[in-house]
Image: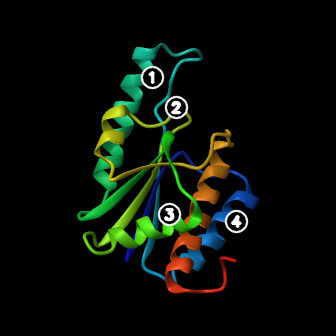
Amino acid sequence: MNIDLICMGKLKDKWEKDAFAEYVKRLGAYGTVKCTELKECRLSESPSPKETERALCEEAQRIREQIPKNSAVIAMCIEGKKLSSEGFAEKIESFSGSYSGICLVIGSSYGLSEDFKKEAQLRLSMSDMTFPHRLARIMAAEQLYRAFSINAGSKYHK
């Protein structure tokens, strides 16, 4: 299965890059993995709701251009569904019958546009807690790896 991660913004610190790279490497055992980093739209110091929405719409268009055909889109968003690791693994498995890949999308610090989220096959939330944006990418990669490990029956998930 093709595994694509589309992320707004770049990882900056070495530890972030190293942690993310480790899970991408592990995911490679389950399919072709690609991570696309897109530049966030610049906003003013205190953007108006209209300015924020315009930026999110522009970012959504750039994201859409990167989504491979026949991929199930997973939009990471605060109001998304909360799943256990096993539940996420089941969802990934259910996509394998209808899609050739999955595409997990992490928006900017302002999130994703409403229109884009409506187009996704799954809106997923990690928690009710707030995490640093760059850490969320590492956590998402780990949970993808865990889901594929669960589905493969490996001992990674205990």
**Cα–Cα gap, marks 2 and 4:** 24 Å
Which part of the image, by quadrant, shows the N terminus? bottom left
Residue 37's mark? none
Whether residues under marks 1 and 2 lie with C-beta atoms below 8 angstroms apart, the answer is: yes
Mark 3 vs 2, N-terminal side: 3
Nearer the camera: disc 3 or disc 4: 3
Q: Secondary structure at mark 4?
A: helix
Nearer the viewer's eye, disc 3 or disc 2?
A: 3
What amino acid is at disc 2? Tyr
Which residue is at 54% across, 45% downward? 9
Q: Nearer the viewer, residue 114 or 50?
A: 114
**Is 153 drawn above or below residue 15 in the view shown?**
below
Residue underneath mark 4: 19
In the picture of the structure, the residue carrying the numbered disc 3 is 88
Q: Earlier in the sequence, mark 1 or mark 4?
A: 4
Q: Earlier in the sequence, mark 3 or mark 4?
A: 4
- 141 above or below 45? below
Q: Check residue 52 in the rendering and tell me which mark sits there, or answer none.
A: 1
- Mark 1–mark 4 Cα distance, whole angstroms, equals 30 Å
Is 74 left or right of 119, judged from the image as shown? right
Q: Earlier in the sequence, mark 2 or mark 4?
A: 4
